[in-house]
Amino acid sequence: MENPSCAIPKRDINFSSLRANSMLSKYFIIGVFLAGASVLAQSEPQSTPTTETRNKAIATRVFEEIFNQGRFEVANEIYSPDFQNHGLHRAVDLKTDQDAVHAEKQAFPDLQLQVERLIAEGDWVTALWTFRATHTAGGYAGLLATGTPIEMRGITIWRIVDGKIRDEWSSFNELGAYSQVVHHVQGKLWIALGAFLALVVVAERLFWAGCKWLVKLFRHKPSQA
């Protein structure tokens, strides 16, 4: 016989209720986690652009705003007062550099510089660019307007410190640009050369004719007693 005093009472376990409570607990934990992550994300400071990104933006302004749009005043914003453009044999200051830019834009009003590659590392930015313009006005390198379409490629290296361009090194095929001008006007050059040679021949003939006339004049001049 069973001992009633030692009998363990039986309880009905509701497994579906336990599963529901477990799911609610999981959803609650996930919700708390997501809410915490959202608060942390909002409290973190916004990421700032890198030095390379800022310097590439400055370099782009040189091409787009100064050269292409002719907004020369932008140079005062992005160039350092002690800027130096390092040429092959000498360096020039900011005023001399920008005077050359003004003359270039005057001689080539439709000038467009297209950036092919732009690479930045620390304070250094390198740009590979293509120059396209039409020589429709004088004042550049002493040349009169020729109407020559010019296309040449060049490379520029800048050192940019604290948001200002401090140094520049540029190289481009200037001789190739002049050869394009010569090729464009070679027909006119041949005509001019022919006219010059004809003028020389005429001048030479006139000179000798004048000499002969003077000789005859002095020969027939009566001698004084």
Image: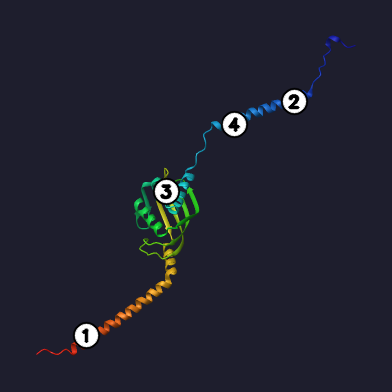
Quarter of the image for the C terminus: give it: bottom left
The residues tagged by marks 4 and 1 sit, at their Cα atoms, a distance apart of 109 Å
Q: Earlier in the sequence, mark 2 or mark 1?
A: 2
Q: Earlier in the sequence, mark 4 or mark 1?
A: 4
Question: Dots 3 and 1: beta carbons under 8 Å?
Answer: no
Q: Residues within 10 Å of mark 2 (few under 14, many from 20)?
A: few
Q: Residues within 10 Å of mark 1 (few under 14, many from 20)?
A: few
Instruction: Identify the residue at image location x=19%, y=89%.
Output: 219
Number of numbered labels in the structure image = 4
Type of amino acid under label 4: Ser
Viewer-closest of 141 and 218: 218
Label 1: element kind: helix
Judge from the rendering whether residue 190 lies leftward or rightward of residue 31; answer left or right.
left
Q: Nearer the viewer, mark 3 or mark 1?
A: 1
Which residue position is annotated with label 4?
38
Q: Earlier in the sequence, mark 3 or mark 1?
A: 3
Residue 24: x %, y % from top left: 71, 26
Label 4: element kind: helix
Label 3: element kind: strand
Q: Earlier in the sequence, mark 4 or mark 2?
A: 2
Q: Earlier in the sequence, mark 3 or mark 4?
A: 4
Q: Nearer the viewer, mark 2 or mark 1?
A: 1
